[in-house]
Amino acid sequence: MSEEGLKVAEAPRTDGGSPIARVHDDVMKRNRWVSGDILEITGSKKTFAKAWPTVDGDPEVIRINGDLRRAAGVGIDDTVKVRKVVLKEATYLELAPTAELPFSGFEDYLIERLQGVPFFAG
């Protein structure tokens, strides 16, 4: 699968807390990526996000929020390697809370919120 070197820029505020990587439509088309594809973003560390097309700004930029930048070990204006990955569906995910769960039914809430979110072993 093809790999792109893209410059990191700040994501729109609306993307805060969401695993979304905004990539210029030209780059999406060139790599045959579609909205919702999972992208591996590699800086000094590796993270994953859902591809989301944009037509604004520099086509050689990837717009990711602060959480994704920290997870990838990069800052604004750093260059990251980006490629599409094909994931397998998890059959098991173990979470270990460090405090009492905040309310009854929280487990069901977590299951709903984590559907479609990419995870990797480690």
Image (cartoon, rainbow, N blue to C red):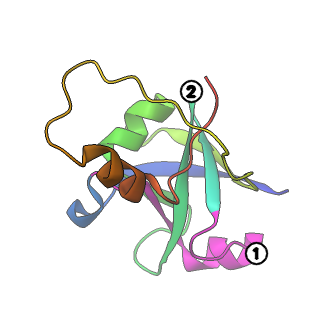
Magenta region, residue range: 17-37
- Within 10 Å of disc 2 (Cα), the crowding (few <14, some 14-19, many 20+) is few
Please indicate whether residue 82 sits to the left or right of residue 58 in the image: right
Q: Which residue is drawn at 69% across and 72% down?
A: 33
* The N terminus sits in image quarter: bottom right
Residue 31: within the magenta?
A: yes
- Give the CA distance from mark 2 to mark 1: 25 Å
Q: Where is residue 46 in the image (x, y as percent from the top left)?
A: 59, 33
Q: Where is residue 74 in the image (x, y as percent from the top left)?
A: 45, 32
Badge 1 density bin: few <14, some 14–19, many ≥20, Cα 10 Å? few
Does the CB distance between marks 2 and 1 fall below 8 Å? Answer: no
Is residue 76 visible in the rendered image? The answer is no
Which amino acid type corresponds to the residue marked 2 in the rendered image? Lys
Residue 38 higher or lower than 23, as above or below: above
Q: What element carries label 1?
A: loop
Q: Position of residue 120 (x, y in %)?
A: 62, 36
Query: What residue is shown with label 1?
Result: 32
The one of 78 and 64 positioned closer to us in this rendering: 64
* 4 sits to left or right of 46: right
Task: Report the amino acid beneath label 1.
Answer: Arg
Pick the front one: 112 or 65: 112
Could you tell me residue 12's position as x and y percent? 27, 63
From this viewpoint, which residue is outermost toward the top?
98
Q: Nearer the viewer, residue 112 or 70?
A: 112
Where 102 falls versus 5 (above or below)?
Answer: above
Residue sitting at x 53%, y 61%: 50
- Residue at point 50% right, 53% down? 117
**Does residue 18 lie above or below 28 as drawn?**
above
Numbered badge on residue 45: 2
